Image (tube, rainbow, N blue to C red):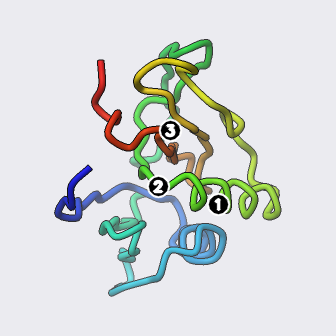
């Protein structure tokens, strides 16, 4: 993979204090700027913004992928394998409930990856993955 510019994602939360505790505390994402209605976080080098919008937090759907029901929508990051493993252990230690437990997907295929899914306190789904071969991120 090459160096990519950071992406920006804004998403709704029902409670900013709960978002702060989860993203900053549980995930270890440093907090950036904030106001009464939003908080910026450094999400593995990318900018995500939790916006207080309790009416926008709703039930979500899922799609089948490699034998699992993958939550839709979701967002996340692709980490190095050691960083992914450390985060999985950190989340287990924090008793985060996984939607899909840390697992290996597409085993033996070009896109083989470690993946895990969980939700923030507002129900937003996150996927954190690591590629067996980082060059295979977009492999068919």
> Quadrant of the rendered structure where residue 47 is?
bottom left
**Label 1 near label 3: C-beta < 8 Å?**
no
Residue furthest out toward the left: 5
Q: Quadrant of residue 9?
A: bottom left
Asked if the residue under mark 2 is in contact with the one under mark 1, i.e. CB atoms within 8 Å, the reply is yes
Q: What secondary structure is found at the residue carrying circle 1? A: helix
Residue at image coords 58%, 19%: 69
Count numbered badges in the picture.
3
- Number of other residues with Cα within 10 Å of mark 2, as a class: few under 14, some 14 to 19, many 20 or more: some
Query: In this rendering, would 15 be left or right of 50?
Result: right
- Of the numbered discs 3 and 1, the one sitting upstream in the chain is 1
From the top left corner, tell me how far across and down residue 67 is, in percent: 61, 12
The residue tagged 1 is: 87
- How far is disc 3 from disc 1 in space, using C-alphas? 16 Å
Which residue is under mark 2?
A: 79
Q: Residue at 38% of width from left, 83% of height from top?
A: 36
Q: Which disc, if any, is residue 132?
A: 3
Q: How far apart are marks 1 and 2 (CA)?
A: 10 Å
In 3D space, how far apart are the residues under numbered discs 3 and 2 (Cα atoms)? 11 Å
Examine the rendered structure and indicate whether residue 55 appears above or below residue 132.
below
């Amino acid at each position: 993979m090459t160096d990519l510019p950071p992406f920006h994602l804004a998403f709704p939360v029902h409670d900013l204090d709960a978002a702060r505790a989860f993203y900053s505390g549980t995930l270890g994402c440093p907090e950036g700027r904030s106001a009464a209605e939003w908080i910026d976080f450094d999400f593995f080098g990318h900018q995500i913004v939790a916006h207080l919008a309790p009416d926008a937090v709703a039930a979500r759907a899922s799609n089948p992928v490699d034998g699992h029901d993958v939550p839709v929508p979701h967002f996340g990051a692709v980490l190095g394998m050691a960083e992914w493993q450390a985060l999985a252990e950190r989340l287990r230690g924090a008793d985060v409930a996984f939607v899909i437990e840390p697992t290996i997907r597409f085993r033996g295929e070009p896109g083989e990856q470690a993946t895990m899914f969980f939700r923030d306190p507002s129900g937003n789904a996150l996927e954190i993955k690591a590629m067996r071969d980082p060059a295979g991120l977009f492999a068919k």
